[in-house]
Amino acid sequence: MPEYQKIKIDNIEYNIIDAIQDFRAEDSFIHRSNKLAQFDGNGESKKHIGTYSGELGQRISNFFEYSSWGLEHIDKEKKRKTIDSAKESGAIIQNNTCFFSKTNLLKYLDDAKAEYYAQEQIYHNDISVYYNERYKEVQNIKTEHIPFSIYDASDNLSQRQNRGYIRSDDYIWKLWRELILPKISYLSILKLVPVLPTTGNDKPIFYFRILLDYQFRTFVHPSALQVIEEVNVDIPKIEELKKSYRIGQEKYRKAVLEHMPQCPFSKITDERLLIASHIKPYNVCIKEKKEDEALDYLNGLALSPTYDKLFDQGYITFLDNGELICGTQLSSYTWDKLNINPTAKNKMRIFPENREAYLDYHRKHVFQDDIDNLT
């Protein structure tokens, strides 16, 4: 029996038996208030998830455990064949077994704040006016996990397009369409089964998560200083700190590599191939006017480039005792090629001495998963 990564939902431990990580949020799907200026239209509420024919179609069918993509159903009200009435016609893919997480939605909004206010992309509207209202709406959700159903909203077979879509009429479906920003957001879905079924029911549930492309996350956003200005931080002082950091960065790098002379993953010791990777991002240190943290060698890890990217973009993190924690954003195939076993009992460790505060920041703000739900 394969060893799966595990995750806790409402204190129940689940195996992640499958995952689809990269359903991009098209401009044609998101709410009209967030649409890019280059596109017209209002956006549609059905989400494209690929083709339902051939090998790719089989992959989607297996994942959702649904094999009737695109079949026509009778809409009794309109008295015609239609796919949009699939829910009423019984073409439900998963009935109340899908859910979003309140924690994930809030984390997405935290990550997207810089883009909401600075708007590196060009939108029809000034989307900053929506941010606080949307954040409060998510905060006011009463439960951590918000269940919903999905049904088949695909183009029908007679159109010969074989494009697979899912849709929901539940409240949370409308809300996530309002939150997400086009092209730079994507949907990840984890397929979960309980490790120890308590009722004899081992049918899967589906954890829907929304994420933002790394370069648009608030702590690395190219226009983040505009957001800093919003909270009245002294911009000239920030620029002075950044200049000071550039002067001190070679000294910082040297100190990091002296303290940690090899990458713990690749075992590489050649300094030309090592990166002094910040644990608490330097942009955050600068924003908080903490130059000492930006240049502190204990706020750094010596990593070879691939592993630097894994850490920098929040796919992996470390506990206070130095133990490696792998997120759930990558496939088992990718972990294998990286020579990392996310389910190993004795995972690789770093020496964490005096790095605890920096590691805590990384787990809470950079790591893409909720550390408390991983097991």
Image (cartoon, helix red, strand yellow):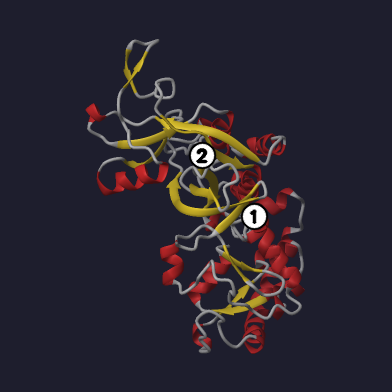
The one nearer the camera, 274 or 367, is: 367
Q: In which quadrant is the N terminus drawn?
A: bottom left
- Place of residue 149 in the rendered image (x, y in percent of width and height, measured from the top left): 51, 32
Q: Say what secondary structure mark 1 lies in.
A: helix
**N-term mark: 2 or 1:** 2
Residue extending furthest toward the front = 200
User: Circle 1 sits on which residue?
Assistant: 373
Q: In which quadrant is the C terminus drawn?
A: bottom right
The image quarter in which residue 148 lies: top right
Q: How many numbered circles does the render carry?
A: 2
In this rendering, is residue 230 above or below 234? above
Task: Look at label 2 and name its amino acid.
Answer: Tyr
Q: Say what secondary structure mark 2 lies in.
A: loop
For marks 2 and 1, give the CA distance: 35 Å
Please give the label number shown on residue 250.
none
| Residue at 59 percent of width and 57 percent of height | 368
Confirm whether residue 291 shows in the render.
Answer: no
The answer to whether 367 appears left or right of 287 in the picture is left
- Place of residue 283 in the rendered image (x, y in percent of width and height, measured from the top left): 66, 64
- Place of residue 232 in the rendered image (x, y in percent of width and height, measured from the top left): 77, 51
| Residue at 76 percent of width and 77 percent of height | 354
User: Circle 2 sits on which residue?
Assistant: 123
